[in-house]
Amino acid sequence: MSTAEETDGDSAPWAEVTPEAARRLLVAAVDAFAERGYHATTTRDIAGRAGMSPAALYIHYKTKEELLHRISRIGHDRALFVLEAAADGGGTAAERLAEAVRSFVRWHAERHTTARVVQYELDALGEEHRTEIVELRRRSDAVVRRIISEGVRAGEFDVPDIPGTTLAVLSLCIDVARWFNAQGSRTPDEVGELYADLVLRMVAAERQK
């Protein structure tokens, strides 16, 4: 099974990508970009992994950059959905922050190959596409910042620097994609639980005394 086919709970990963040939090319591109990096990967590499001719790629994607943009857009949309679902759920700010971190970390662990491309190849995008993706990242930042701000107002959190803490929380979660190994000693669920606990300690340190 291709590493890019690791599932995050979806019955059919990349199901929104059609037709089938376009999906195969996208999956192959995820694997190639994660393994070799965007700039070192050629369209011939991607087509070969998909079992197709280089010319076939251009039927579905005008450029290699368009492929990267499609991967990045889908990945960022999914990550934002995970955060918004947790933020808009019931419970206290602490419960919602824990669920946001738990779900966000789990997504980055379960789909670590895809997440590495989504999170670390941003600079390879063209200006227009990069601006679009940066806006999605700002929305993710705003979701976490909102939960933390609500926790501070409710007296649940002791956070003197909300923007800085938000950045630290997101950076901690995203970095899971860099080091997570499916054959390692921890499952995605276990890493999610660990990070949720760490983040709650980060924002409400006085409660741990």
Image (tube, rainbow, N blue to C red):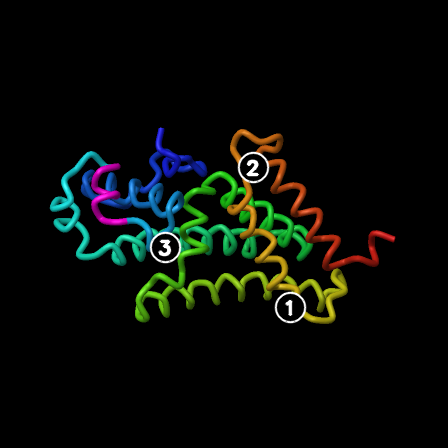
Give the position of the N terminus as an image quadrant.
top left
Q: Crowding near pointer 1: few (<14 within 10 Å), some, many (20+)?
A: few
Instruction: Say which quarter of the image contains residue 21.
Output: top left
Q: Secondary structure at mark 3?
A: helix
Which residue is more in the foreground, 11 or 25?
25
> Where does label 3 land, which residue?
72
- Residue 164 — which label? 1
- Measured from the top left, where is residue 134 in percent x and y? 42, 66
Q: Residue at x 20, y 38 (%)?
A: 20
> Where does label 2 land, which residue?
188
Q: Secondary structure at mark 2?
A: helix
Q: Residue at x 30, y 66 (%)?
A: 126
- Measured from the top left, where is residue 51 in percent x and y? 20, 34
Q: Residue at x 31, y 54 (%)?
A: 68
- 129 horizontally vs 200: left or right: left
**Residue type, mark 2 in image:** Pro
Q: Which residues are magenta?
A: 42-49
- 25 horizontally vs 86: left or right: left
**Residue type, mark 1 in image:** Gly
Q: Secondary structure at mark 1?
A: helix
